[in-house]
Amino acid sequence: MAAAANQSCLIGKLGHYLELMPRDEALLAACEGEELEFRKRNIVRREGEEIDYLFVVQTGWFYGFTLLPSGKRQVHRIFFPGDFIGTHEIVCTSATYDITAASSGVLCRFDKSCMRDIFLSSPRLTALIYSLEALEQISQDDRLRAIARMDAEGRLAHFFLQIFSRIRITEPEIGNSLRLEMSQELIGDALGLTGIHVNRTLKAMTKAGLIELEGSQLTLLDEKQLKALSDFDDRHYQIDIGWFPEL
Amino acid sequence: MAAAANQSCLIGKLGHYLELMPRDEALLAACEGEELEFRKRNIVRREGEEIDYLFVVQTGWFYGFTLLPSGKRQVHRIFFPGDFIGTHEIVCTSATYDITAASSGVLCRFDKSCMRDIFLSSPRLTALIYSLEALEQISQDDRLRAIARMDAEGRLAHFFLQIFSRIRITEPEIGNSLRLEMSQELIGDALGLTGIHVNRTLKAMTKAGLIELEGSQLTLLDEKQLKALSDFDDRHYQIDIGWFPEL
DNA sequence: CGGTTTTTTGAAAGGGCTCAAGATCCGTGG
DNA sequence: CCACGGATCTTGAGCCCTTTCAAAAAACCG
């Protein structure tokens, strides 16, 4: 659980990477919008809708996806507690993909114009937001590499390690086990695989002692081996703030 | 050809999206580093190297890639004239992939610390740089979707359309034909395919009248059909600057 | 509980890969 | 301006990982 669920969503997330100054906190607090509750399968927004708001995930898992003409589905991104939703779409006038709740959860909404205020008055905060965006890109690069060049086992290993790496930032106490808020079909849609083949591969990985699955509870039994299988490099989701402006 | 090859690389690129103010131009001019020449296959930098510089492509094509333990290669990104190289890696202390020249070409180098100066003194320029980063992400999302969910023909169609869409920004006069500065093997490494299979698919696409290949000269004969095949959505590589700060 | 969503399993088909070997193209040096 | 050697492009054949299609068992939710 987040240490400070009752404080500002934004401050909680950004403060993780950087010590915020009082004026930065004030700036963020002013941005704060209302909290919205969702239940599994609820739609947060649709592709093509005008984007007026950004979100921060307070609790629960969410995911963004698009459909293809063939009827296939591609999951573009999964959002965990603490993640921003929609920041990179600020350059578009309408959303580039649908967003749905993978589990029940709560989002904090804040106005898009808030970005301008931050850019105008806090170079340091701006640099942080920019960095988070850049980090996301590197993470997506790693994912593309796994999807384009690895077999099902490698993709799944990489996928799980990425999930753990991200969630451990805000919830280090989970250890090597967590509740997967995704069906095997959805996992397949994130990795370019069929749900059926995800199932078969998961079985094989279980038999090999790599993981354990009890219902939706996933446990990583042999992280070392999983890393070897997927050539996983933990970016530590930590950023270099050496170049940040002082203000 | 770039309209103003003799002026600052940065100004040329950024000025394309936004009218720059004199003080912004001065800021950028001060960042300018030296120009570096490369020939095909020359290595610009290696994965793991410390990142002190960013680059802007002045002429030629460049690409970033990583190798997998299996010996396979993944091309993460291709850089065309006008593109930034390395901005998203500013959050890392070392490079996340190798960069090599796909053709002969020239890069403009500028110091990483330049970013701090921009963040500190021009919110408007900062917003622009942020937006370019975000646009890149959306473009990569599209690419992931094609790679994860489409067959070889769809991936190639999408790949070609993306290339044309990007290059046409700075060189609209190319029309529907350009010189592909990549071997079929390299294209395969960008799309998660074998060079051999790229070859076969290209032949089929030629026979179907979709494209024409004479040596490395690629011509799109039926863009409409190519778009349908790959569900391509031209992001116009144009950005919403409505939210930009005035300064 | 009863309906819906997931997970499982089998069998067969297919797209893309591997391995191999020849044909071409191209830059470079003489 | 021609010849040489490496890089690229081609093509064939067989194999393998994933997908499809179907259908039953289990798990989940209200």
Image (spheres, coloured by chain):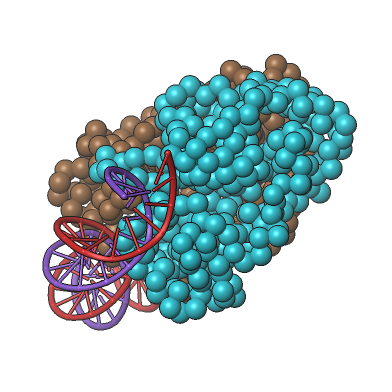
Chain colours: A cyan, B brown, C purple, D red
Q: Is residue A56 left or right of residue A244?
A: left
Q: In percent of the image, x 69 and y 19: which residue is there?
A: B245
Residue B216: where, in percent of width, then height?
32, 51
Q: In percent of the image, x 56 and y 74: which residue is there?
A: A221
Residue B174: where, in percent of width, then height?
37, 34
Q: In percent of the image, x 86 and y 28: which residue is there?
A: A23
**Any part of residue B58 in sight:** no
**Any part of residue A247 in sight:** yes
Front residue (pair B34, A176): A176
Q: Is residue A119 left or right of residue A147?
A: right
Q: Give the quadrant of the C terminus of chain A.
A: top right
Residue B90: where, in percent of width, then height?
69, 48
Above or below residue A173? Residue A50 is: above
Query: Dividing the picture into quarters, in which one does residue A132 lie?
Result: top right
Front residue (pair A218, A139): A218
Q: In this view, does B161 lie to the left or right of A11?
A: left
Residue B99: where, in percent of width, then height?
56, 57
Q: In this view, does B219 lie to the left or right of A105?
A: left
Q: In percent of the image, x 41 and y 68: which residue is there?
A: A202
Above or below residue B145? Residue B171 is: above
Front residue (pair A41, B129): A41
Query: Dividing the picture into quarters, in which one does residue B30 lie?
Result: top right
How many discs mark residues in the rendered view?
0
